[in-house]
Amino acid sequence: MLLDMPRLYLITPPISDFAAFAPLFDAALAASDIACVLLRTEARDDGDRKKIIRALAPMAQAHGAACLIVNDPQLAVRADADGVHMEATGERLKAALSALQPNRIVGAGGLTTRDAAMTAGEAGVDYLMFGGPDCAEPHASIVERVAWWAEIFNVPSVGYAHDLEGAPDLVRAGADFIALGDAVFADPRGAPAALRDAAAIVARVGEPAQ
């Protein structure tokens, strides 16, 4: 059976020094086809965050990847990001949708229950992420929720892989995107090598059975 081929969704570590991170970032983006980058920042104030995003977002966009930031729709607009990933539900998520759509992307994460996922999907988000770099949810639980979502709903899902070995399960579960964070940036071989391996794993699992 030929599986739909998910694309890779890259989550950066929290960045405080964009100049130091830029060469690594560019090499990672060049190593594989990346659909989307979630650019996380670690800065003292919004001014510093804006500088980081304005420096790095064009690099992602030049490689054909959408660049999102976390939880700040206004900053996404001011810094020319492609959208926002909201680790929030309720009124904050609704406000982001109202402010950014249809011209920018709004994704949702931090969805700890099925009800929260369905509510976010019904609100009109562009994707839902199950798991994440700051979430302790075990791999098996992420896979189960991706499979449940893929069977019933049409809104694209992102499945977070704690490590490269977790990617095949998410492909088979029906994830539209495979999110990779520390699995890439903490790999001792370097992010480009890890991303090339991830792309090869996804392609291999998606091939039709002989």
Image (tube, rainbow, N blue to C red):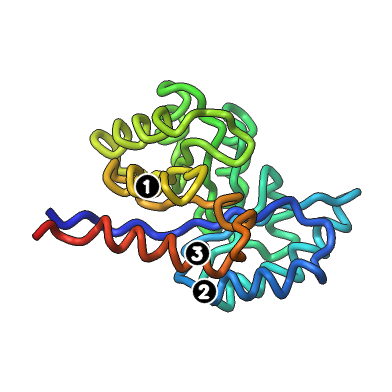
Binning the other alpha carbons within 10 Å of mark 1 as few (below 14), some (14 to 19) or many (20 upward) gives: some
Instruction: Find disc 2 in the rendering and name its residue.
Output: 31
State whether residue 201 is above or below residue 173. Answer: below
Disc 2 marks which amino acid?
Ala
Disc 1 marks which amino acid?
Pro
Nearer to me, 177 or 192: 192
Secondary structure beneath label 1: loop
Q: Residue visible at 34% across and 56% down?
A: 6
Residue 83 in view? no
Q: Residue visible at 47% across and 63% down?
A: 35
Of the 4 image quadrants, the one containing the C terminus is bottom left
Disc 3 marks which amino acid?
Leu
Residue contact at pointers 1 and 2, CB within 8 angstroms: no
Instruction: Find disc 1 in the rendering and name its residue.
Output: 156
Where is residue 126? Give x, y as percent. 45, 48
Instruction: Find disc 3 in the rendering and name its residue.
Output: 195
Q: CA distance from mark 3 to mark 1?
A: 21 Å
Where is residue 195? Give x, y as percent. 50, 64
State whether residue 96 is above or below residue 112. Answer: below
Binning the other alpha carbons within 10 Å of mark 2 as few (below 14), some (14 to 19) or many (20 upward) gives: some
Q: Answer with mark 3 or mark 2, whichever residue precedes in sequence.
A: 2
Residue contact at pointers 3 and 2, CB within 8 angstroms: yes
